[in-house]
Amino acid sequence: MPEVVEITFLRPLRRNNNENVSPDSDRVEDLQPNDLGSSSSTPPAPPPQPGPVLREMNDSDVQARQQRLETSLREAVGIHNDFARNSEITNEQLWIAIKENAAGIKGNAAGINENAAGIKEANAGIDANAKGIKGAKAAIDAHAVVTNSMIVDGNTAVLVEVRRMLNYRDPPPLLPDDFWGSPHDEKKDNEPPPSPLLSPVPSLPSRPSHVSSHSYR
């Protein structure tokens, strides 16, 4: 169990000017009601603070104050502001403006989507053009290969024919690189080659014996 502590309040001694009391005196004066304070005692009210004297506002004061407030609002909002010049904007008008803005935003979004679709189509056209350019380049390359092959074949045929005409005989279809330096047959080297294209040159007649040599001078 908690211990019970008894507290005894002692009042300090009071001395009267006309009475001599020794320091070790046991005299205790009677306690007054407000000496130690009681629950029924109330603190005194504070003195009034110094300040302006309050008074009631009449109609003229209220109107002047309202005019000053309106002037301050106009200066804050601005003379050229629509809300300052037209103070009769209703909530319905505001909602109409908001709906119109929302419709404009939707229209802008639709335009953006159309632009994106156009950009995609343009990219597809660019890709198709690139493929067409690649196909044309491949066709040009193939045509160049065929043309070069035809030129090489024609030059080879002409060269073979020229060599055949110079040697008076038919060379092989494709002459080796060392054709001009290849050794010939000894029998064929001693014999003149046949000349199918050129006719043989007739021999000159011999000079008659009875003609003197000085007659030709």
Image: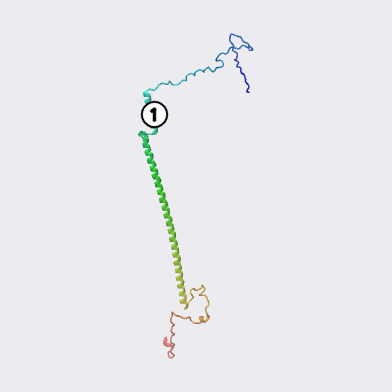
> Foreground residue, 31 or 209?
31
Name the residue rendered at 39%, 29% in the picture.
69
Q: Is residue 76 above or below residue 127?
A: above
- What element does badge 1 sit on? helix
Q: Residues within 10 Å of mark 1 (few under 14, many from 20)?
A: few
Check the image and name the residue furthest to the front. 1
> Foreground residue, 2 or 60?
2
In the rendered structure, the answer to whether residue 13 lies left or right of residue 91 reads right
In the rendered structure, the answer to whether residue 181 lies left or right of residue 64 reads right
Check the image and name the residue furthest to the right. 24
Q: Is residue 118 above or below residue 166?
A: above
Name the residue rendered at 41%, 48% in the picture.
113
**Quadrant, the N terminus:** top right
Check the image and name the residue furthest to the bottom. 210
In the rendered structure, the answer to whether residue 62 lies left or right of residue 2 reads left
**Quadrant, the C terminus:** bottom left
- Percent position of residue 33, x then y: 55, 14
Q: Is residue 115 above or below residue 40?
A: below
Q: Quadrant of residue 83?
A: top left
Name the residue rendered at 39%, 44% in the picture.
106
Residue hosting label 1? 69
- Percent position of residue 102, x then y: 39, 41
Q: Amino acid at mark 1?
A: Leu
Is residue 66 visible in the rendered image? The answer is: yes
Number of callouts: 1
Q: Quadrant of residue 109?
A: top left
> Foreground residue, 48 or 103?
103
- Percent position of residue 172, x then y: 49, 75
> Foreground residue, 93 or 160?
93
Check the image and name the residue furthest to the top. 18
- Percent position of residue 204, x then y: 43, 85
Image colouring: rainbow
